[in-house]
Amino acid sequence: MVGHTGGPPVLTAGGVIADIEHGEAVRAKHLYGPEMRRRDIMVGLGALASHEASAATFPWLSPDLPDGTRAEAHLVQIPNKQPLIQLSDRPPNLETPIQAFRTGITPNDQFFVRYHLAGIPGARDLDNWKLEIGGDAAEHPARLGLQDLNDLPQNEVIAVCQCSGNRRGLVQPHVAGVQWGNGAMGCASWHGPKLRDVLDRVGIKPGAVEVWFGGVDEPVLPVTPEFRKSLPMSKALADETIVATTMNGSPLPLLNGYPVRLVVPGWTSTYWMKHLSQIAISTIPIDNFWMQKAYRVPAGMFAVEQPFTSQNNEQTWPITEITVNSLIASPIGGEQVDRSGFTIGGVAWDNGSGIERVEISLDGGKSWQDSLLDRELGRYAFRTFRLDTGPLPRGAAELRVRATGNNKQTQPDVWKANPAGYHNNVPQRVLVTVV
Ligand SMILES: Nc1nc2c(c(=O)[nH]1)N[C@H]1C(S)=C(S)[C@@H](COP(=O)(O)O)O[C@H]1N2
Ligand SMILES: [Mo]
């Protein structure tokens, strides 16, 4: 295992979040003794602190979210994380508050958490972690440890990890699924060997069509399908696709995939397998619920540069590339702003073509002006932007933001409705009061 301080947090069987790594056990027990329910450990940002707190107390929860979500969503404080918005408990689905997107890199302790299965691993389950690589198109299967990965040539990529369902909760009419607001995403610097170099350790036979991936989390009920995903060979062998052993210079937080996760820059994070423990190079397409039923969009609805042909059918395609998007993180909705002028700031990102332009409207979309783009951290990274508004008339104002990629894709005025609520990239609206 890699050495690290402040062990990763663990969800115990009883559903109480505790931290059992090393000396942290005592502190965790003290802070959140096993008798305490999760609801009791909620804290607020700053002075906010009550599990009664809801829409009225958290103005930064978008008004577009379903009422039920606005009432239920609350901040939780878990070890080694700042307060995150809890949207579900088992499995844990935790959203990053919008304030975190004022910088291009999302700190590990503010990074969102998404799981499909309640049987998520604790740190002890990962002590004997190994990565098994095989499949019918592998020349000679192998079992690698962390040191084997560290011995391969190392790469860094700064890339946005965005859930396919980010902003699903903001679409109208509402659709089923985790009701994410704007924070089911983050951008980090990921470090580790290329997947290609890992696959070369076992050798790829001719005839390989996909690489399949599994992690150590397991369904609690036998009827629940295991979470397994696959990539086409083109994306698996691409320069940017890595097996990350660190995140922002530290070991991965437990809930973000410790000790190793797949990083697939430009693609939504459903493919970014956490606690990666199985890789199979395969001559046949994977056939399971998570690839063939879930995470799919109507065929041809969203332009992609690299089709995933082995998984396409006539009606639907797997969701793959991120669509161009942008977010104002300052000011936030409901805030009062100064009529002498204020600075608007946030982030924009796309599938890796890179951000060419971010426009801002101060009048609800009637007129637009270019913002200033900060230095690019990498083509898969968040690009921060800002605009000094200058003086504005008093009263209500509606800000909007719209990004365009180097590939000329831009954000549509109307969401391309699809059953799962994916790819919601209509320009965000932020209502503020100029005083
Ligand atoms: N092992 C495992 N990996 C996983 C998942 C999962 O449920 N289990 N969910 C995927 C999905 S849909 C998303 S959005 C990202 C979330 O990554 P994060 O929890 O680090 O933010 O992990 C991906 N990798
Ligand atoms: Mo996701």
Image: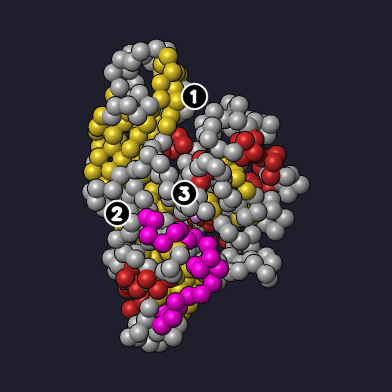
Q: Going by the image, does 428 lie left or right of 420? A: left
Task: Residue 289: say if magenta.
Answer: yes
The stretch in magenta equals 280-302
Q: Which quadrant would residue 411 be assigned to in this image?
A: top left
Q: What amino acid type should be assigned to the residue bearing mark 2?
A: Gly
Query: What percent of the width, then of the height, locates residue 400?
Result: 37, 31
Crowdedness near tag 2: few (<14), some (14–19) or many (≥20) residues, C-alpha within 10 Å: many
Q: Which quadrant would residue 358 be assigned to in this image?
A: top left
Viewer-proximal residue, 242 or 331? 331
Mark 2, residue position:
352
At x 28%, y 29%, the residue is: 368
The answer to whether residue 285 shows anywhere in this view is yes
Q: Which mark is residue 417?
A: 3
Mark 1, residue position:
334
Q: What amino acid type should be assigned to the residue bearing mark 1?
A: Gly
Disc 3 to disc 1, C-alpha distance:
27 Å
Query: What percent of the width, then of the height, locates residue 49?
Result: 63, 30
Q: What secondary structure is found at the residue carrying circle 3?
A: loop
Task: Compare marks 3 and 1 and give the one earlier in the sequence.
Answer: 1
Q: What amino acid type should be assigned to the residue bearing mark 3?
A: Ala
Q: Going by the image, does 402 lie left or right of 18? A: left
